[in-house]
Image: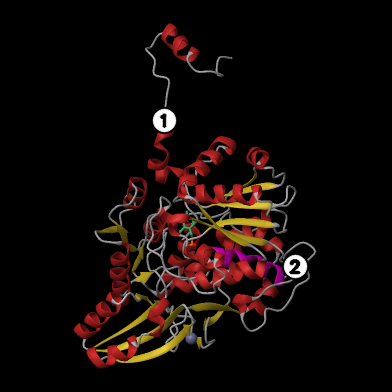
Amino acid sequence: MAFVSGLRCRECSREYPAEALNVCDFCFGPLEVVYDYATIAEVVSRDRIAAGPLSIWRYQDLLPASGEDPVDIMAGYTPLLKAKNLGKRLGLNNLYVKNDSVNPSYSFKDRVVSVAATKALEFGFETIACASTGNLACSVAAHAARAGMRSVVFIPSDLERGKVIGAAVYGPTMVAVDGTYDEVNRLCSEVGDNYPWAFVNINMRPYYAEGSKTLGYEVAEQLGWRIPDHVVIPSASGAMFTKIWKGFNELACLGLLEGVPPLTFGADQNTVHHPAITTRMHMTQAEGCAPIVNAWAAGQSQVRPVRPDSIAKSLAIGNPADGIYALRVIKESGGSAYAVPESEVVAGIKLLAETEGIFTETAGGVTVSGLKHLAESGAIGPDQLTVAYITGNGLKTQEAVEDVVNPLTVKPTMSSFEEALEGRVGIRS
Amino acid sequence: MGRQRVKFTFEGELVKEPIIYMLGRDFHLVTNIRRADVGESIGWVVLELDGEKEEIERGLQWVSSTGVRVDPVSGDVVQG
Ligand SMILES: Cc1ncc(COP(=O)(O)O)c(C=O)c1O
Ligand SMILES: [Zn+2]
């Protein structure tokens, strides 16, 4: 069972029942889930979590949908590995990579969609929908298949092949919209208002977004119920960024972290900051679409929307819904925000692949190049515990790194092989 | 009749333009402001428009043509 007591407007604090709503009727501000933390505190424990399923549903007491029979294709419980080689390159002795590229549909979106799909079924919806530049579409279609629901996914018509196929294979109704980014956005917003569907990031959004908290819980659990000194996160809407922070703070307030005394949550559950949470939250975006980073750099508390033009399509959201809240988290945590030059996105993908054997998509290239910048600029000290979040899989954006393919082409004879090998330095022995 | 919730973002000199007044005068829309934050060089207003469907459409096109950005109230619907 979920310990949800309702929804609450982030701007004016008006309260609403826990229904399929995302916007406050009064001020049009975003609604967020309100939890009954007093009851959660009585139920939850490290042992109970450890005994749970090997998916995000091990944290079901902290999620807004019932974990009794969730739509679970085993999102989450992904590896956290010590990145010794990459660390050595960057001068970081205590670096970890959270490899979320190995989720069932190959991105962290499975975490949010698993929660949204479970909630949509609870509410009695038959169709689940989204508008996406790829990863979300893959995840929605996959979870709908598992849940026996219909799915409708809207995508821009110029999307990478890997993402189109990676979504289409699950059998959704796929709508490829031929138009500018703004036009796709406008159409989907109108569809959302007019069809009785569970639109994961519209009427399901308050529940959906909470799924990203598990990226915070898992890292803490995998570190032995401790939190990192620094995290590096790629952002589009900024939602995941704010929820990882919320996840750390919830664990602290509930007394689940090593050596940290519990604390009450106060009236606004979404801005709670336990003093023991000292993690610095670093955001990365690609230069061609960096509205949140730009606002941070200019010292503004508002985000000026941009027209996206970036190789990192999964991060190319021009008017980020959670931008202003993400800015507050950067400030509160003593973090930073950095826009990675477009030309360095691919370098980041290659660096991670060559040092750690992990093939990430363009969003991960942004994270790794951002991490490199933080290390080189001294923002992260050599011995500080650092986690870089790798949120999507390279097989979906293969076009970006096609130039790596440069095989030795040989005839099927030993002499041809040896001749070719001779031509390449360093692989003789 | 139609009704639409929108967010206008103004920059630079546009902050001083009476855009919302003009929507009432020239397009016969009732404008209902719910939230706003207007600074010296950038500002936004979240509001609801009531009026004839075609007039809302025409009105929003006109607002865009002045250089003011028109967006859905809760940010982009498209996600990664
Ligand atoms: C791989 C990947 N990483 C990061 C993000 C950013 O997430 P958010 O929109 O919550 O900032 C997305 C999608 O939006 C994504 O697909
Ligand atoms: Zn409100």
Residue range (magenta): A241-253
Q: Earlier in the sequence, mark 1 or mark 2?
A: 2
Mark 1, residues whose alpha carbon is within 10 Å: few (<14), some, or many (≥20)?
few
Mark 2, residues whose alpha carbon is within 10 Å: few (<14), some, or many (≥20)?
some
Q: Nearer the viewer, residue B9 or B77?
A: B9
Name the amino acid type tagged 2. Answer: Ala
Quadrant occupied by the C terminus of chain B: bottom left
Q: Is residue A151 magenta?
A: no
Predominant SS of the magenta segment: helix
Q: Secondary structure at mark 2?
A: loop
Residue A324 x, y percent position in the rendering: 52, 72
Identify the subunit bearing mark 2. Answer: A
Q: Is residue A272 above or below residue A237?
A: below
Residue named by callout 2: A276
Residue A336 x, y percent position in the rendering: 61, 61
Evaluate whether residue A320 shows in this view: yes
Name the amino acid type tagged 1. Answer: Val
Residue furthest right in the image: A259
Residue named by callout 1: A405
